[in-house]
Structures are given as C-alpha cells and as structure tokens.
Image: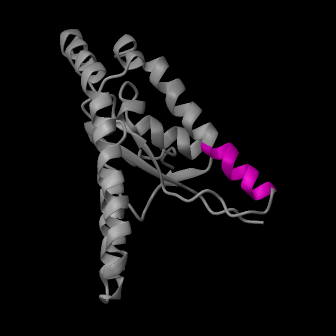
Amino acid sequence: MKPREDPVPVHHDDSWGPLPPRPAYSLLIRFVLTVLLLPLWWALIVVIFLGFIAFGIVAEILTVIPGFEKGFLGLIDKFGDSVKVWPAWCVTLPELRHEGDAAFYRARVDKRIASWTAKELAAQKAKKAPPPGPHDIPVREYRGVGAGYVVEAARARDWELSHDRHSDPLRVVRLRRLPVTY
C-alpha cells in the first residue's frame, strides 16, 4: 500500500509566494513622494466627492428623467470602487522600515484576519447579520509573506477565498467567512 501523501497546496505558482524586497532607494523616493503627494490626493478625492454632492443637489430636478437617479448613483459607486484612499504607489513609514521582514507582514495579516473573525463572532453571538464581505487584504499587508500565507492563515480561522470576486495575488486577496453550521 502506498503511503498517504500530504495534500497538494492549492496555489502552485510563484505569484502566491512572498514578493521580492524592493530596493531601499526606490522605497525612500516613494516614501518622500507619498509624504508630499498623498495629502493632495486626499484633497482631490474630497473635492470630487463634494462636486458629486453639489451636482446631486442641483440635479435633483433631473430625477424626473427615467433612469437618471440610478445612473448617477452608479457613477458614484464606480468612483468609490475605483479610487483608493491608500493608492498602490504610496509607501508608509512602517513599510519603509520593515521591507522584507516576514515577521512584520505575518503579524499584519494575522491581526487583520483576527479582527474580522472577532467581528464575525460578535455578530453571531448577538444574532445579527455579519459585516458585509468579501473582505480584501491589499498586497501592502502581505508583501513579505505572500498571498499563500494569507490563504493559509485565513483557513485556520474558517475563512476561504471569495468566489464572487476573484483574488489577484499580486494586488489583493479577497476572503469570505465560511458559512456557520449549527
């Protein structure tokens, strides 16, 4: 009889592993640009959002046109989904200091998943609806340990990859909580 083999990991390619550390000079330049440009980015987001509100108030007259309101709300949703508060180009001070430190990134991932798990369990205990999902973990949270670690850490706490919105291991991992059986 053949000995039982360990289960084959779900993710085979290198994109699910840790990303290589970025050069220090590149990180330093990106950090300086983040310090200078991120406040301007946030101000631009606020100005555009206020513009949407102002247009919405004025466009209240146009709601008599069939489908106008639905289209306008769809535009706002698209804007909210596509614009990130922390864009991919920015580098924070912890990222600058801990680039390539697997323990730092492991702790970040574990903390985020533990937080979501606590919220889910609290909702179950209170017999309320759980927080909406899927929950995204951006690459900035798991860069040093890889998306594969995120999946393994999530599975240990009864989470799995989202089937509704697929993950891209080089950008984001999307998780959902496994259904609770009583």
The residue that appears at 61% across and 56% down in the rendered structure is 131
Residue 81 percent location from the top left of the image: 34, 55
Span colored in magenta:
116-125
Which residue does the image show at 75% across and 58% down from the upper left?
124
Percent across and percent down for residue 9 are 41, 44
Q: State the scheme by which the image is colored.
A: one colour
Whether residue 87 appears in this view of the structure is: no
Give above or below for 177 relative to 21. Answer: below
**Residue 166 vs residue 103: left or right?**
left
Quadrant assignment, res 125: bottom right
Q: Main secondary structure of the magenta part?
A: helix
Looking at the picture, how far across and down is residue 177, in whole percent? Answer: 58, 55
What residue lies at 63% left-to-right and 39% top-to-bottom? 115
**Residue nearest the viewer, comparing 112 with 34:** 34
Q: Residue at x 42, y 17 (%)?
A: 94
Towards the viewer: 64 or 177: 64
Q: Is residue 148 magenta?
A: no
Image quarter in which the C terminus is found: bottom right
Count of number-bearing discs: 0
Residue 110 can be seen, yes or no? yes
Q: Quadrant of residue 57?
A: bottom left
Q: Nearer the viewer, residue 20 or 14?
A: 20
Asked if residue 59 lies left or right of residue 110, the reply is left
Name above or below for residue 55 compared with residue 167: below
Measuring from the top left, give residue 161's x and y in whole percent.
Answer: 46, 53
| Residue 122 part of the magenta-drawn span | yes
